[in-house]
Image: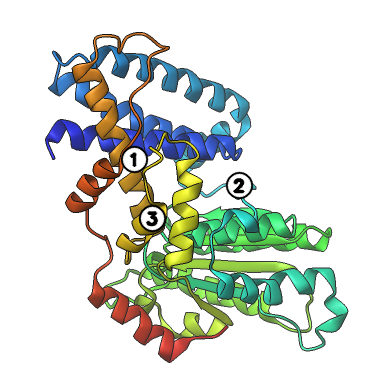
């Protein structure tokens, strides 16, 4: 694959993700993805000024920039808060928007869904049935691109919870005592919301970056970790029926410090999709594509054994890029907005499949299975 094709693929990937987040109401995430797409398209125009696609690139850049401005205007207050955070180095614990994801939008993962229903959804609906309390620390671990973030967002929607998306980098501060105050502030706001009858989910993506033990860590990192332990102990107290949950997602569960592992009462392995899940994902993504009738999605799902959800999406994006590239290079009517590329054929998919491999190695899968065997808690 040429450098131009690779950059095109990345631009399409970010643009598609932006559209998905935009449709789900996640303004901040959508704007970020649109901006990534703009930067890649600008680089394409700079590196390849004479390619015929440049007019399309510039048109897309203009459209994405317009949408970014609209999103920033819609979320003006959040933007001001973010600027204040950047200026002061302090985390502003505002409620974060959550994508409008539902259980049915997540293919398969029945074990994970059932464990979360038992730990989160049922206690919210009938707390009187849980005299010993209920799990409030949920660790989701597994290969990247398999739906850990979607599960957390779907849970928040299921119980109509406030959703706090914690960025470990934003929590840490160079100022003495600031990092632990940032952690305390997040939990304080979540508890306050819960006391008013609104459940709260604190979601920490890549939680290993905050809670992994490092021999060379500085004092601020250790204090932030200890504060997080203290705050989690507070919400895990069975005598306090708080509807505050901590969801942690990690691709490296073995990096977590053991005291944190113990506080996550539910430790759920989110594996690579099986055949049924891959088939469902292909059908979902194919709704936006023009697949030729000859395409055998069952066979395609079989051939993608070992692929993550993001791998599947990337493969279909590559097939779409292939037919679009051919459309621009061989069709004189490409500038006509009514003209469309040909359908994606089975041959296109086979060709792309031969050039793409899974992003998750067998050694990594073995490590996940071993950690799951040692620490599983469904």
Q: Nearer the viewer, residue 101 or 278?
A: 278
Q: Which residue is mark 1?
A: 317
Quick one: SS at disc 3? loop
Q: Residue at x 36, y 19 (%)?
A: 61
Q: Which residue is mark 2?
A: 96
In the image, residue 353 above or below residue 38: below
Q: Nearer the viewer, residue 333 or 5?
A: 333
Quick one: SS at disc 1? helix
Q: Which mark is residue 147?
A: none
Q: Residue at x 64, y 58 (%)?
A: 103
Give the alpha-carbon distance from disc 2 to disc 3, as whole Å.
24 Å
Horizontal side, residue 314 vs residue 150: left or right: left
Tell which tag, 3 or 1, sits nearer the viewer.
1
The colour scheme is rainbow
Which quadrant would residue 16 be assigned to in this image? top left
First-in-chain label (2 vs 3): 2
Farthest-out residue, right? 128
Q: Tell me if I can see residue 242 in this picture.
A: no
Q: Which residue is mark 3?
A: 174
In the image, residue 51 above or below residue 139: above
Which quadrant would residue 39 be assigned to in this image? top left
Number of callouts: 3
Horizontal side, residue 218 vs residue 47: left or right: right
Q: Residues within 10 Å of mark 3 (few under 14, many from 20)?
A: few
Cβ atoms at labels 3 and 1 below 8 Å apart: no
Q: Residue at x 60, y 31 (%)?
A: 75
Query: Looking at the picture, how far across and down is residue 329, in whole percent?
Result: 19, 19
First-in-chain label (2 vs 1): 2
First-in-chain label (3 vs 1): 3
Horizontal side, residue 284 vs residue 356: left or right: right
């Amino acid at each position: 694959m040429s450098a131009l094709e690779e950059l095109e693929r990345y631009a399409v990937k970010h643009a598609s993700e932006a559209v998905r987040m935009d449709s789900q109401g996640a303004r901040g995430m959508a704007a970020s993805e649109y901006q990534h797409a703009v930067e890649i398209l600008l680089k394409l125009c700079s590196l390849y000024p004479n390619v015929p696609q440049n007019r399309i690139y510039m048109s897309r850049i203009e459209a994405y920039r317009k949408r970014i401005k609209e999103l920033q205007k819609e979320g003006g207050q959040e933007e001001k808060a973010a600027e204040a955070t950047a200026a002061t180095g302090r985390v502003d614990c505002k409620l974060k928007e959550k994508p409008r994801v539902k259980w049915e939008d997540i293919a398969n993962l029945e074990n994970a869904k059932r464990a979360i229903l038992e730990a989160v959804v049922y206690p919210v609906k009938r707390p009187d049935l849980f005299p010993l309390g209920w799990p409030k620390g949920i660790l989701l671990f597994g290969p990247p691109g398999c739906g850990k973030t979607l599960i957390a967002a779907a849970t928040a929607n299921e119980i109509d919870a406030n959703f706090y998306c914690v960025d470990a980098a934003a929590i840490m501060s160079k100022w003495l005592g600031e990092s632990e105050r940032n952690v305390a502030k997040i939990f304080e706001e979540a508890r306050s919301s819960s006391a008013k009858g609104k459940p709260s989910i604190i979601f920490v993506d890549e939680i290993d970056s905050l809670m992994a033990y490092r021999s060379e860590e500085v004092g601020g990192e250790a204090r932030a970790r200890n504060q997080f332990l203290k705050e989690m102990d507070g919400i895990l107290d069975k005598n306090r029926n708080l509807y505050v949950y901590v969801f942690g997602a990690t691709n490296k569960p073995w990096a977590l410090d053991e005291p944190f592992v113990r506080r996550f009462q539910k430790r759920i392995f989110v594996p690579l999709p099986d055949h049924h899940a891959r088939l469902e994902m292909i059908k979902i993504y194919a709704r936006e594509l023009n697949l030729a009738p000859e395409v055998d999605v069952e066979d395609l799902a079989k051939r993608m054994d070992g692929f993550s959800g993001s791998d599947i999406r990337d493969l279909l994006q590559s097939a779409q890029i292939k037919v679009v590239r051919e459309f621009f290079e061989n069709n004189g009517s490409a500038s006509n907005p009514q003209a469309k590329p040909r359908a994606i054929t089975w041959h296109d998919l086979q060709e792309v499949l031969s050039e793409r491999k899974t992003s998750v190695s067998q050694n990594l899968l073995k490590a996940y299975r071993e950690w799951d065997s040692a620490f599983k808690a469904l």
